[in-house]
């Protein structure tokens, strides 16, 4: 009896778009069609239910819809076991606050994106979540195959005529299968915490790290400094050279920044062209050396785009954690410092 397993990740992506705005549906379908992504469209939650099928990888769901809201649809949808692995991205208005976003995650959302959005960022998020979905499917298939083979092995072991050599051979193959599953788990863990475009930590992961570091500060009374970083005039890059060039700028400079921080520091994409850098065991004064280095490496980093070479400067807001403040208060102070840096001319950092 042969024992074979091969890792196969699906390449095709199917997306269900649910939005009561015809303009939004037409826009999203055009964006996805350009990437050869199969799109199914529904103008309401009621219209979406009959369209559900096992091939759907990602649902793009508008939050504000008449009759049944996106959140209410999401609550009912998450009760369906057969679609438990489907990833859901919620489209929200710019005005939605953090509490509303938190309620979306509690209802079962995997991500959200505010309207209006950049097509490149939208595609990146859809592909990232689809890849996560495919990896989860592959992992489940591996586990099912492994359980089946393991049961077969136990039955064969019971037979007196089964030779020790064959037992060892099958055990070896099982060990290899487990090794593949461990690698798949590692890959799944990596993709679920990384921003696909920049390979830095994604928003959810970097905020989790920040919350953990705040708890550590409260226990050990150690310093913690936070940098909120923004690419200067990044919209002008997109408008002048196109969103693909904008992606190149994000990738190039984020890689340079990642190489410039210490091994214990963490960098993550907070949204769009904004990044967060966490500096554990670091006072505000000691962080200034790193801030100077980051400003410098951004200035001298040459980026080849559309037959030309450009540089991309950055602005930063820097602040040290104050005892007993919440994560939102900590981030808000860093964001205030960033705003002051941009208002005072950009290409600099401001501390609070």
Image (spheres, rainbow, N blue to C red):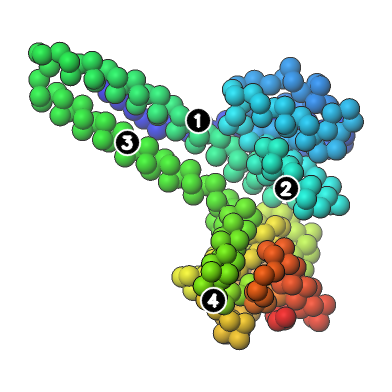
Where residue 313 appears, as percent x and y from the top left, is 68, 74
Task: Indicate left or right for 259 with 99 as reference.
Answer: left
Q: Which mark is residue 137?
A: 1
Q: Find disc 4 in the rendering and name its residue.
A: 222
Question: Residue 22 appears in which quarter of the rendering?
Answer: top right
Name the residue located 52 percent from the left edge and 47 percent from the top edge.
Answer: 191
Name the residue located 40 percent from the left edge and 29 percent from the top edge.
Answer: 142
Spot the residue most to the right. Answer: 66
Q: Earlier in the sequence, mark 4 or mark 1?
A: 1
Task: Indicate left or right for 96 with 238 as reference.
Answer: right
Q: Find disc 2 in the rendering and name its residue.
A: 102
**Dot 2: within a 10 Å radius of its alpha carbon, few (fewer than 14), some, or many (20 or more) residues?**
few
Disc 4 vs disc 1: which is toward the camera? 4
Image quadrant in which the N terminus is located: top left
Say above or below: 43 vs 270. above
Q: Label 4 vs label 3: CA separation?
A: 41 Å
Q: Is residue 37 visible?
A: no
Question: Residue 61 appears in which quarter of the rendering?
Answer: top right
Mark 4 and mark 3 residues within 8 Å of each other at the beta carbon: no
């Amino acid at each position: 009896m042969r024992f074979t397993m091969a890792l196969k990740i699906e390449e095709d992506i199917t997306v269900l778009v649910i939005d009561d705005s015809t303009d939004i549906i037409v826009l999203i379908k055009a964006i996805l069609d350009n990437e050869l992504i199969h799109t199914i469209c529904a103008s309401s939650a009621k219209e979406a239910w009959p369209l559900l099928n096992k091939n759907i990888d990602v649902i793009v769901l508008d939050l504000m819809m008449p009759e049944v809201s996106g959140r209410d649809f999401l609550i009912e949808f998450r009760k369906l076991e057969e679609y438990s692995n489907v990833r859901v991205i919620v489209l929200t208005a710019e005005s939605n606050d953090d509490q509303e976003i938190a309620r979306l995650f509690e209802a079962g959302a995997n991500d959200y994106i505010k309207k209006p959005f950049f097509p490149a960022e939208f595609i990146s998020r859809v592909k990232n979540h689809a890849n996560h979905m495919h990896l989860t499917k592959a992992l489940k298939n591996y586990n099912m195959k492994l359980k089946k083979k393991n049961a077969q092995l136990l039955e064969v072991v019971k037979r007196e005529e089964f030779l020790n050599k064959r037992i060892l051979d099958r055990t070896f193959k099982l060990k290899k299968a487990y090794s593949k599953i461990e690698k798949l788990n590692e890959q799944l863990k990596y993709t679920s915490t990384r921003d696909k475009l920049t390979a830095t930590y994604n928003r959810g992961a970097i905020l989790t790290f920040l919350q953990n570091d705040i708890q550590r500060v409260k226990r050990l009374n150690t310093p913690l400094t936070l940098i909120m970083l923004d690419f200067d005039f990044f919209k002008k890059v997109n408008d002048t050279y196109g969103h693909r060039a904008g992606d190149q700028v994000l990738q190039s400079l984020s890689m340079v920044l990642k190489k410039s921080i210490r091994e214990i520091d963490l960098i993550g994409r907070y949204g769009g062209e904004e990044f967060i850098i966490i500096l554990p065991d670091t006072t505000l004064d000691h962080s200034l050396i790193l801030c100077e280095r980051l400003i410098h490496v951004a200035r001298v980093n040459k980026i080849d785009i559309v037959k030309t070479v450009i540089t991309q400067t950055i602005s930063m807001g820097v602040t040290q954690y104050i005892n007993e403040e919440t994560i939102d208060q900590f981030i808000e102070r860093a964001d205030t410092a960033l705003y002051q840096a941009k208002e005072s001319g950009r290409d600099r950092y401001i501390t609070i």
